[in-house]
Amino acid sequence: MFDAKFIYWINSVALWTIALSLFFPIFMLFIQCCTALFPVQPKNQLRRLSKPKVGVLVPAHNEALGIKATLDTLFPQLTEQDQLVVVADNCNDETADIARSTGATVIERYDADCRGKGYALDYGLKALVSNPPDVVVVIDADCIVYPGTIDRIASLAATTGRPVQAVYLLDSPAQPTPKDAISALAFLVKNLVRPKGMSQLGLPCLLTGTGMAFPWSILCQISLASGNLVEDMQLSIDLAVAGYPTLLCPEGQVTGVLPKQQQAATSQRTRWEHGHLQTLKTQVPRLLKASVQQRRFDLLALALDLAIPPLSFLVMLWLGIFIIGLAATGLGVATMPVWLLAVEGCLLLIATLLAWAVFGRDRVPMQALLAIPFYILWKIPLYFAFLFRPQTEWIRTDRDG
């Protein structure tokens, strides 16, 4: 009898622990999606008397196919006092020559051992030291920068003395599959809906890799040289802990295109999501500790935001635990954790549908939502790979022709 009661107690505690652990990221996601629905309130911010001098860094590794289109969207937004520097990093194509033909300053870097965007950015910063700008803007070489974006994010960074993130979205490729549409929706939730919800609450967001602006006074104090899979996410955490949390600038926008090739899409998602999960595992405890030590609520909120895993992984995790909970209930284990899991499932569904209905309906047709189960199935090998052989090396995603 004692053994049966003990096993029942252990199973109940385990189920309660898992259910509560899932509640916090799901509830945070729900709050973000609901808060993002409110209209943006104008903020009374001090204006600079003069336009900041901007240095735009464009790290590029074999980007000959698309770099001219990116630079063509940048030059009209710059003035004579601004600089545009392309870092041709370990290139073996015509990236450098094409960039020079547009009038950009091009510096070339070759280092087979130190590969990754972080190393390229660090190299570019050193090139700006002799004539430092007020604000450094980072733009990926495969992006389209919407008119006015550079001025908006640079001015906000100069005014506040904090890093600034424009809205970065990925469009579906030509002739998209339903999987492409769901991937674009997941990216939209991560890079638009959730950061906007945080901004509406007066809280910082995470950097997303491109469309980023930094006051020079901040960047000159740190080293960006890193092969981190998600160097932008790590950088935003480091800066937040140091007292420089990132602001969202919803008026600025940068877009890219999801890769159409299956292998390229898988490589891209593997790098992003393995990097996200590794950062979640190591940096959430760090942020929680810093929030207590510095008595800062914004770091606690950022920890809860970072604790939300990739959306498909969160759905997969919830579904697996919910099925286990139902089976355990059938064996006589406590039913209350299963009711909590059911509530979490409802919150997850409502948050996703709200995000789609308000922000993603134009990008993702309703019939594409039926592909969500197949999209999650496509991700299963990716997450199993994280358990047994997580990706640790930065690998550039192949571009479509």
Image (tube, rainbow, N blue to C red):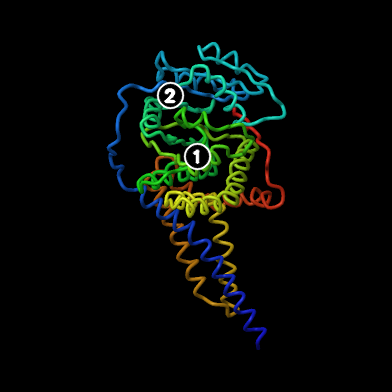
Quadrant of image for the C terminus: top right
* Disc ID at residue 239: 1
Residue 292: percent from the left, percent from the top? 48, 55
Which image quadrant is residue 81 in?
top left
Task: Give the secondary structure at mark 2.
Answer: loop
Instruction: Identify whether 22 is placed above or below 225.
Output: below
Side of 297 relative to 46 (left or right): right
Q: Amino acid at mark 1?
A: Leu
Quadrant of image for the N terminus: bottom right
Q: Amino acid at mark 2?
A: Asp
Q: Are marks 1 and 2 in contact (CB under 8 Å)?
A: no
Mark 1 or 2, nearer chain start = 2
State the residue position of label 2.
Answer: 134
Identified at 49% across, 74% down, the residue is 336
Residue 380: percent from the left, percent from the top? 63, 52
Q: CA distance from mark 1 to mark 2?
A: 18 Å
Task: Give the secondary structure at mark 1.
Answer: helix
Side of 313 relative to 193 (left or right): right
Number of residues whose C-alpha sits closer than 10 Å to that of mark 1, classed few (under 14), some (14–19) or many (20 or more) = some
Instruction: Identify whether 373 is placed above or below 14.
Output: above
Please tell me how many numbered marks the rendered image carries.
Answer: 2
Relative depth, front residue between 358 and 20: 20
Residue 313: percent from the left, percent from the top? 57, 53
Which image quadrant is residue 245 in?
top left
List the single residue furthest toward the front.
Answer: 293
Instruction: Identify whether 57 is placed above or below 319.
Output: above
Identified at 48% across, 50% down, the residue is 305
Identified at 47% across, 22% down, the residue is 55
Residue 45: percent from the left, percent from the top? 30, 35
Instruction: Identify whether 390 is placed above or below 341.
Output: above
Side of 255 relative to 224 (left or right): left
